[in-house]
Image (cartoon, grey):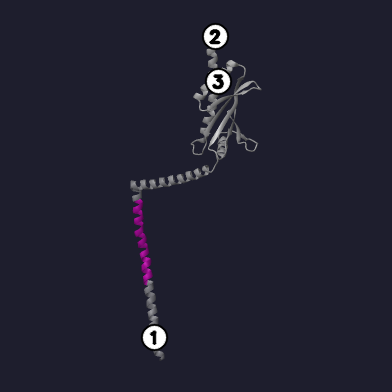
């Protein structure tokens, strides 16, 4: 091939490359020029959606409903988590935790196998007996009253008052005879369900403990009434 022909072929190649470069540049310029137009076209669409969101009450209600549903879902998940945590807590542990919440200090029995929990409430000494495996708590208020064993009249009044108390109060009141001390001692007991599903567990326990004081008051009041009645009969 002669040198003239080679130069002719190179000229054609250079011309083709130049044309291709020009075509690519034109396409790029067209795309760049279209981009602002596309952005301009998007902005009215966004403005329209914003306007509809602000002006359309149904759209606002929809947003509010979605937010409420999300909040309720979150609360339910939190309640479920708390429920699972409480379910794993035994009755004994739950009772001691509740005592602390209502401001009662407590002590545990020292002997192995003795499940009693000693505590004071409003100046009165109680003890509870329960385990983590049970769902009930036995509450005792012992030796809160007494009469002399050989005071027949007072002993009779006490028995009548205790019968009336057991009919009118939720706690059960009993008496025991201490022959060595020559006394009749008075005690009260209650058995209550104690599980985490009970609402307001602290108030629930306070209410039950207050029933013991109602039993105290009832027995004392009834014995006083019986004395007055007997004196009125004698006079």
Q: Please check the rendered image and state whether residue 72 is part of the magenta-colored stretch, yes or no.
A: no
The quarter of the picture where the C terminus appears is top right
Q: Which numbered disc flags the more N-terminal residue, 1 or 2?
A: 1
Choose between 203 and 171: the one closer to the eye: 171
Is the residue under label 2 in contact with that under label 3 (CB below 8 Å)? Answer: no
Q: CA distance from mark 1 to mark 2?
A: 150 Å
Q: Is residue 216 above or below residue 13?
A: above
Q: Main secondary structure of the magenta part?
A: helix
Look at mark 3 in the image and give the residue it sits on. Answer: 159
Query: x, y (%) of residue 166?
Result: 52, 24
Badge number at residue 9: 1
What span is in magenta? 26-51
Q: Please check the rendered image and state whether residue 34 is part of the magenta-colored stretch, yes or no.
A: yes
Q: Helix or strand or loop: what does disc 1 sit on?
A: helix
> Residue sitting at 48 percent across and 45 percent down?
80
Look at mark 2 in the image and give the residue it sits on. Answer: 234
């Amino acid at each position: 091939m002669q040198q003239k022909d080679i130069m002719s072929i190179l000229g054609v190649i250079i011309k083709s490359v130049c044309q291709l470069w020009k075509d690519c540049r034109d396409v790029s310029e067209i795309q760049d020029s279209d981009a602002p137009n596309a952005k301009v076209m998007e902005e009215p669409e966004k403005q329209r959606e914003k306007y509809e969101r602000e002006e359309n009450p149904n759209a606002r209600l929809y947003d509010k409903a979605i937010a409420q549903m999300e909040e309720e879902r979150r609360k339910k998940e939190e309640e479920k988590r708390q429920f699972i945590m409480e379910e794993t807590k035994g009755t004994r542990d739950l009772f001691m935790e509740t005592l602390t919440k209502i401001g009662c200090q407590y002590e545990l029995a020292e002997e192995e196998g003795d499940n009693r929990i000693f505590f004071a409430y409003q100046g009165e000494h109680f003890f509870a007996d329960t385990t983590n495996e049970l769902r009930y708590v036995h509450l005792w208020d012992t030796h809160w009253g007494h009469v002399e064993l050989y005071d027949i009249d007072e002993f009779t009044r006490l028995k009548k008052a205790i019968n009336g108390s057991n009919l009118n109060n939720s706690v059960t009141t009993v008496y025991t005879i201490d022959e060595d001390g020559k006394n009749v001692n008075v005690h009260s007991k209650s058995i209550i369900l104690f599980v985490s599903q009970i609402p307001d567990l602290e108030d629930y326990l306070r209410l039950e403990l207050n029933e013991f004081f109602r039993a105290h008051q009832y027995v004392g009041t009834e014995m006083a009434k019986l004395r007055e009645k007997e004196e009125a009969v004698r006079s």
